[in-house]
Amino acid sequence: MNDFTSVQEQPRHHSPEDIIRDNKGTRAICAYFYDLFERNHSGFRWMKANPTTPIYPKVNLHSIDLCYMEQVKNSSLWANRQVRNIAIASYTFEEIYQWYQLGKGEGYLELPDRDDRLILKGLITQEILRHDHIKNSDGLVLADPS
């Protein structure tokens, strides 16, 4: 009889990305943002009205903002250039879960870890980029703004 545990019997350790990716809340959030950028939906319409302004998701503790960057005045030199995030829309995790009828305990109510927020931002961006009419160009823009 072996006195060690085989690899198959050891509990599987999930990476932080696996934990975020496999969460029902993440799947609901990604589906929500995919739908938001369907043709003629609000995200698409905003991009059509602002074709030269790249936007991006910004994941906060309890919510996700759609933002664009604005250069702060009085910073003419590239090295001294400062930008600020301007939110055009904000969605809480809870309101997205309600939209997809997730029950209590499904999903997360907050993401206190910065790495988890970055993972979720990447997953949302990937989901939005599944649309043929959107591309990544220092943010999300329409592939053909005409």
Image: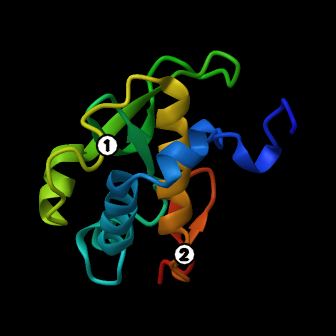
Distance CA(mark 1)–CA(mark 2): 19 Å
Residue 134 vs residue 102: left or right? right
Q: Residues within 10 Å of mark 2 (few under 14, many from 20)?
A: few
Residue for point 55% across, 69% down: 129
Q: Nearer the viewer, residue 14 or 46?
A: 14
| Residue 131 shown left or right of residue 81 in the figure | left
Q: The residue under label 2 is which amino acid type?
A: Arg
The image quadrant that residue 68 belongs to is top left
SS at circle 1 = strand
Number of dots carrying numbers: 2
Q: Where does the image place residue 35, in percent across and percent down from the top left?
A: 32, 74
Query: Relative to residue 117, is residue 95 depicted above or below?
Result: below
Q: In the figure, is residue 81 to the left or right of 32?
A: right
- Which color mode does the image show? rainbow
Disc marking residue 64: 1
Instruction: Reply above or below: 32 against 10.
Output: below
* Res. 91 mark: none
Whether residue 92 appears in this view of the structure is no
Q: Measuring 48% from the left and 45% from the top, which residue is drawn there?
A: 20
Horizontal side of 98 relative to 62 (left or right) equals: left
**Residue 12 visible, this angle:** yes
Of 58 and 120, the residue lying toward us: 120
Residue 86 quadrant = top left
Mark 2, residue position: 130
Which residue type carries mark 1?
Ile
Disc on the earlier residue, 1 or 2: 1
> How packed is label 1: few (under 14 Cα within 10 Å), some, or many (20 or more)?
many
